[in-house]
Image: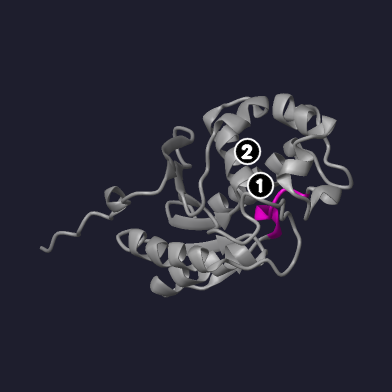
């Protein structure tokens, strides 16, 4: 499976508050403009299926891309955001002053978000969701619209990066990370790409 992991576009919370699983957080005007650009960037890419986290911001990012391919968006809970529990909705600058934040930055594998899950639990469910897609779409191209930390922990798993170092991986809004999952083991083809994707255009079939 050729897997395109795509982070959702900007929301009014991006960079300010930790949205988590809070409902009703849609894309900002700038986010919608980003999605229009993403549709153009994804134009040369063939997709056989499109999946998304169940949250509004990922579905809103996915729908225009899926529509441009004549596909529908299928939602999978396993692709959802980290469950930050009591941290959801709080300002990042406030959270950055807490002892737990420092632990999450230094040793995320040992931290549990209050009332939520651990980063390792997020990684396990995200990878399980991706592996299920791999069995459902062997040798196909699949777009998955999800969240920065979900992409980072999945990328860490397939690249063999220890989970305590996953913060070193940068995933910008509407960036595309491309993985190949198939015979011979996983391969990381692109990370945090915000430019052209023409290199993934399927080769034209020869006639005769």
State yes or no: discs 1 and 2 in contact (Cβ < 8 Å). Answer: yes
Is residue 81 rendered magenta in the image? Answer: yes
Q: Residue at x 72, y 42 (%)?
A: 93
**Quarter-wise, where is residue 53 in the image?**
bottom right
Q: What residue span does the magenta drawing correspond to?
A: 77-83
- Nearer to me, 6 or 139: 6
Q: What's the colour scheme?
A: one colour
Q: Which residue is drawn at 49% across and 68% down?
A: 32
Q: Is mark 2 on a helix, strand or loop?
A: helix
Residue that protrudes farthest toward the left in the picture: 208
Q: Name the residue under label 1.
A: 126
Q: Which residue is drawn at 66% across and 29% down?
A: 163
Q: Name the residue under label 2.
A: 153
Q: What element carries label 1?
A: helix
From the viewer's perspective, is residue 108 above or below residue 92? above
For residue 167, say whether it is visible: yes
The local crowd at label 2, few if under 14, some if 14 to 19, many if 20 or more residues have their Cα within 10 Å, is many
Sequence-first tag of 1 and 2 = 1
């Amino acid at each position: 499976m050729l897997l395109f992991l795509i982070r959702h576009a900007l929301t009014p919370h991006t960079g300010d508050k930790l949205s988590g699983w809070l409902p009703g957080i849609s894309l900002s005007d700038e986010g919608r403009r980003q999605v229009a650009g993403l549709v153009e960037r994804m134009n040369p890419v063939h997709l056989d299926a499109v999946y998304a986290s169940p949250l509004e911001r990922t579905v809103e990012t996915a729908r225009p891309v899926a529509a441009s391919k004549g596909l529908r968006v299928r939602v999978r809970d396993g692709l959802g955001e980290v469950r930050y529990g009591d941290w959801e909705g709080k300002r990042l600058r406030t959270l950055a002053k807490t002892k737990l934040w420092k632990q999450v930055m230094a040793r995320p594998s040992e931290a549990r978000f209050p009332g939520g899950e651990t980063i390792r639990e997020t990684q396990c469910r995200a990878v399980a969701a991706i592996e299920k897609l791999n069995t459902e779409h062997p040798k196909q191209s699949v777009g998955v619209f999800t969240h920065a930390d979900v992409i980072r922990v999945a990328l860490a798993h397939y690249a063999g990066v220890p989970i305590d170092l996953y913060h070193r991986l940068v995933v910008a809004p509407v960036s595309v990370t491309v993985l190949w999952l198939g015979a011979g083991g996983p391969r990381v083809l692109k990370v945090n790409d915000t430019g052209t994707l023409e290199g993934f255009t399927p080769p034209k079939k020869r006639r005769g």
